[in-house]
Amino acid sequence: MDVTLTIRRFNPETVDEPSWQSFEVSVQPTDRVLDALHTIKWEVDGTLTFRRSCAHGVCGSDAMRINGRNRLACKTLVKDIDPTKPITVEPIKGLPVLKDLVVDMEPFFAAYRSVMPFLVTDGHEPTRERLQSQSDRERFDDTTKCILCAACTTSCPVYWNDGQYFGPQAIVGAHRFIFDSRDAGGAERLEILNDREGVWRCRTTFNCTDACPRGIEVTKAIQEVKRALIFR
Amino acid sequence: MSSTVSDSTTAGPPPAPRSRKARGPGLHPEMIGWLFMRLSGVLLVSLILGHLFVNLMIGEGIERIDFAFVAGKWANPFWQFWDLAMLWLAQVHGANGMRTLINDYASRNSTRMLLKAALYTASFVVLVLGTLTIFTFDPCAAGSTLSVCSE
């Protein structure tokens, strides 16, 4: 079958403003949007620029806005998004576009780094592994699934308007350690998120939960951090 | 030969978390605002439903609402404080909602300041005027035909 992909193109070396360009490609209904992008890049226009690495929904490189929703191009089948109409593909919003579908991820990673996304411990290092019960592991299981694709953060209207907001992903990253029974840095992380630009900026619009390709209940995680702040 | 390595490829410890002013654990103004919205919301639901029930449902309902009805209610401190609570909670709840909208959507500092100044001024005027009205209400103001006033 033939589908039309309307792609937001931008080359800062030749033009000032992004523009739309349409490509018609032949795909199988069970092909992914990423396959269609590959066909364009490999057979039609080699200048089309996008990120992808594993191409199987694990690395989180190819988050993009497909038909107005943030998704991973490698997990979105053409047949699932009405191939009879043109499929629009744009870079994720709220981060500076470098070229075509590639954005500068640094502000996103900076927010992630600022919540200390690493195990903080106190006391002596144990001679064996740090044990954890199944129920303690269950407590933060959902937020361990994050692949840092930025689909949630760049679907958040508060993040679009205020680059200072940590964004949903950073809060998910903090949640993963705050509720880890082996971690001792929870109080410090909560204090970082108890900021003017922290969890209180969340407007509970659920865009992040809808956008997450891993099915993480992002808004719920943010609410749990708020509750932890109130009842600490 | 030495070569320059760009920052992003240099291995090293992660940078320190963003430096922040020391603030004891507990109450951040934004947290108080967030909590206030929830608590005042719950209170307002019961206050407003109670208000609507008493004014519209009991007895003859909407038919009896006139100057005398309001004068009668405000002769009772219970209703004075009920209305005062509705006024303050609703006004502060609404103003705080507008404040967050302005913070979310006005990106220029000067625009934000201007909008917030207008918001706070308007809220202040409404609160002062409303509070004055509730407590200084005189049922026998000029032209009143209420029977209690002719005694």
Image (cartoon, grey):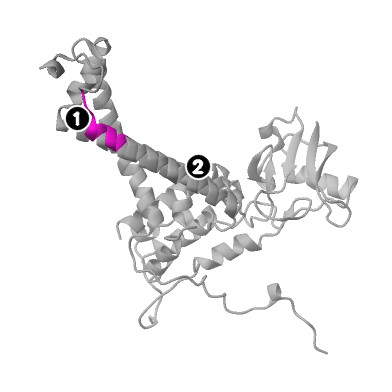
Disc 2 to disc 1, how far (Cα)?
40 Å
User: Which mark, residue A206?
Assistant: 2
What residue sits 33% from the left and 47% below the top? B36
| Chain of the residue under label 2 | A
- The answer to whether residue B129 is above or below residue B61 is below
Q: Which of the pair B124/B98 is nearer the observer? A: B124
The spot of residue A7 in percent (x, y) is: 79, 42
Mark 1 highlights which residue? B79
From which residue to which does the magenta span run?
B130-139
A114 over A34 or under it: above or below: below
What secondary structure is the stretch in magenta mostly built from?
helix
Name the spot of residue B81 as percent of width and height, x first: 20, 35
**Marks 2 and 1: which is nearer the front?**
1
Which amino acid lies under the numbered mark 2 shown in the image of this protein?
Phe
Callout 2: helix, strand or loop? loop
- Crowdedness of circle 2 by 10 Å Cα count: few (<14), some, many (20+)? some
- Residue type pointed to by label 1: Trp
Chain that bears disc 1: B
Residue A181 in picture, x, y percent from top left: 36, 65
Asked if the stretch drawn in magenta spans residue B138, the answer is: yes
Q: Residue A2 in the image: x percent, y percent? A: 82, 32
Q: Left or right of A82: which side holds B32?
A: left
Q: Nearer the viewer, residue A186 or B45?
A: B45
At horizontal 49% and vertical 65% (from top left) the residue drawn is A115
CB under 8 Å between discs 2 and 1: no
Q: Which residue is at the front of the view, A116 or A44?
A: A116
Q: On the image, which quarter does residue B94 sit in?
A: top left
